[in-house]
Image: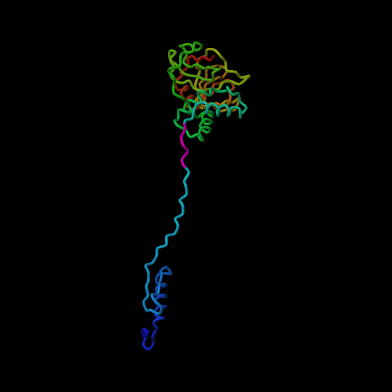
Amino acid sequence: MGLPLGRNSTVSSGGRSRLALLLAAALAGGALACSVVGSGSSTVSISEPRVISAPVAALPVLPERPAFTVVDAAMIRSIAQLALVEQGQPADLTDTDLVARDVLAGGPLAVADVRHKTYEILSGFGPGGPFDPSMPPRPECPPAARACIDVGGKRAWLQDGGRITYGPVPITTGKPGFETTLGSHRVLRHVRHDHSRIFDSPMPYSTYFTTSGMAFHEGRLDEPSHGCIHLGHHAAAQFFDQLRVGDEVVAF
């Protein structure tokens, strides 16, 4: 018996099966599995649609943050000495022990950041360093002196009655032919924003202590001076603020 299709049309049993298959495929977008039961049978069985899961792409592996490590003083000293050699400066131009102290004072560092921090301090922008009250008095600098300059050791500090109140901090001193004058001196004057006309060089926080023009002032710690005492930015500001006209300065 045919299936009515309109007023005068019929479809055979086999045609009905094929029609059902086409209908099912159209509805499921080709994802339904169809089967005809028995030869010539009019029964059509349609299974549930199968959900086909697309493979999930692997998520990209994000790079880990650089791990902090224990950066020791030996590593920092080596980097500082290499920086001096690269610039054609003597390896003992500045106290690399104090440079290492100032690098470590900022807390843990990633190995990749140590070089940058060391160069930053050599350029004069270190923390200045905490004072070290445990450092024993130096007989070369009498208790009456307010500022002490260890020219050979490339360090300077402030003191009161022989007790350190600030420092020691790394310094650079005069180059050959422009050596820093040793002995006892007195603070003569302060000039906050000075500039050397002879050497065309800025001298921030200048604290003069000789009539020949030698002074404490802000300067790079990876180059020698023309007799002055180069201090980092923060140290130069401390010497400028704490020293008074007439205070004794001893260089040894």
Question: In the depicted view, which residue is nearer to us: 242 or 170?
Answer: 170
Question: In the depicted view, which residue is nearer to us: 23 or 130?
Answer: 23
Residue closest to the far front = 38
Looking at the image, residue 40 lies above or below residue 247: below
The percent position of residue 117, horizontal first and vertical second, equals 51, 32
The tally of labels here is: 0
Q: Residue at x 46, y 52 (%)?
A: 58
Screen quadrant of the N terminus: bottom left
SS assignment for the magenta stretch, majority = loop
Q: Is residue 88 left or right of residue 216?
A: right
The percent position of residue 241, horizontal first and vertical second, equals 45, 22
The percent position of residue 12, horizontal first and vertical second, equals 40, 83
The percent position of residue 251, horizontal first and vertical second, equals 53, 15
Q: Which residues are magenta?
A: 64-69
Screen quadrant of the C terminus: top right
Q: Is 11 colored magenta in this rendering?
A: no
**Residue 174 quadrant:** top right
Looking at the image, residue 42 lies above or below residue 75: below
Q: Is residue 74 left or right of residue 90?
A: left
**Residue 203 quadrant:** top right
Looking at the image, residue 121 lies above or below residue 66: above
Question: In the depicted view, which residue is nearer to us: 225 or 138?
Answer: 138
